[in-house]
Structure formats: structure tokens, C-alpha cells
Image (cartoon, grey):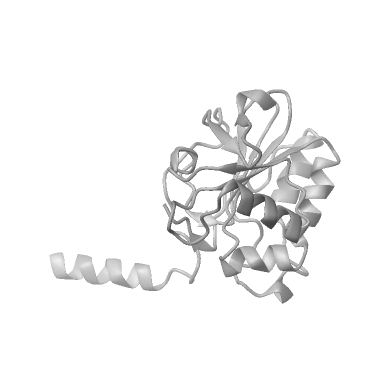
Amino acid sequence: MRKALCTGLVGLLAMQPRGIAMPQGGPEIGQPAPAFSAMDSHAATRSLAEFKGKWVVLEWVNPECPFVRKHYNSGNMQRLQRTYTEKGVVWLSIVSSAAGRQGYMTAEQANQFEADQHAAATAILLDPTGVVGHRYDARNTPQMFVIDPNGVLLYDGAIDDRPTARPSDIEGARNYVAAALDEAMAGKPVSTPKTPPYGCTVKY
């Protein structure tokens, strides 16, 4: 019986698409998003409470991850950032890589990344101890969250429905973040509130 159970588990793991996280715990859709406070790349302390009354997007980022590079090198992430920050959405890019791990950035490196990529996030938050990442059970880069003006979590998961590192797959993809924001900002329920995130694991 034990052997059969183990064999079944191995088979289940083998069937998981590469780059997609297995279902995890974390904050619940429709519930208050976890509170947090973190230093940004300009040495200012930012908190979720600071943005009460505004739409908020959280984006976990690792500039060395090929899945992240897919969206930044193509300009896709920056277009999303500009489209929604121009509508008043607060966009927070969060770096939860620990010191010495892939994707870790100092404040200076984060600011250089922002300049090099012409990124348009409201702020880049530095989370080297992983406090914010663990609070949201962030597993992948990029992993995205959408929070409404009342602080309620509306979306958690992948940026889109093409779990690859190929920039060519961006065209024609369903962007879950854009869909969630468009629906929610129009007063409609989010049709796809939770999806399996894909990308590199967060390097805690």
C-alpha cells in the first residue's frame, strides 16, 4: 500500500508542467490581503496600509530569472505597469531573494534595474529576509497579486496563461492581471481569481 502511494505521488509530481508551482496555501481570495511593511529602493518605508483606497498590484521579481526576463526584455511588464499606474493603480515590485541568492539586489542595483529596463512600478520593495514573500506565500517569479481599494485580495497567480520563458508566447496570451484589474475596476467580479503561478522559485 505504501509503495503504491509513493508511486502515485511520484507520478503526480512528474505530470506537473515544468515551471508551474504545485498548489500551495497562502492568503485567501476575497479576504483582507496580509499587511506588510518594507523598505523600498530609495530607503523609504512603504506599507500596504499606506495605499488604502487604491488598487494595488504586487509583482514578485528576480531579474536573473528567464521567465521574468521574458516579460521585461519584451517590454510586456513595463507596458502593464504604465497602463495601470496611469489609471491610478499602485504597482509594487518585490524582491524577496536572500543575500547571496539568485536575484538578490541592493537598493542601488534595484534602481539600476529600474533604469535599464525603463520599468514603471510605483516602487521596488526589498525583502531579503523574505518576510513579505512568506506572508503572501509567494513561490515564483513572476507571481502576481491584485488588491482592491478596501484591501481585499482579488487575484493571486500567474501573469498569463502561457507558462513558458519564450517571449514569442506573449502575443495571444490571456493576461490574468490585466483581466482582473479591468473586471474589478469596472465593478465586475474577477472571472479568474486564482491560477497556478509559473516561473523560477523565489530564492529565500
Look at the image and tell me whether residue 127 can be seen: yes
In the displayed structure, would residue 86 be above or below residue 103? above
Judge by depth and name the residue closer to the eye, 36 or 171: 36
Q: Quadrant of residue 185?
A: top right
Q: Farthest residue in the front direction?
A: 108
Query: Is residue 176 something that shows in the picture?
Result: no
> Residue at the spot x=48%, y=43% of the render?
133
In the rendered view, does 122 fall on the left or right side of 61?
right
Question: Residue 56 vs residue 17: left or right?
Answer: right
For the residue pair 123 and 183, the one nearer the viewer reads as 123
Most extreme residue toward the right is 86
Of 83 and 61, nearer the camera is 61
Q: Position of residue 175 (x, y in %)?
A: 72, 57
Q: Which of 95 and 112 lies nearest the eye of the viewer? A: 112
Horizontal and vertical percent for residue 202? Answer: 47, 55
**Vertically, is 27 above or below 61?**
above
Q: Position of residue 85 (x, y in %)?
A: 80, 41
**Residue sitting at x 63%, y 42%:** 41
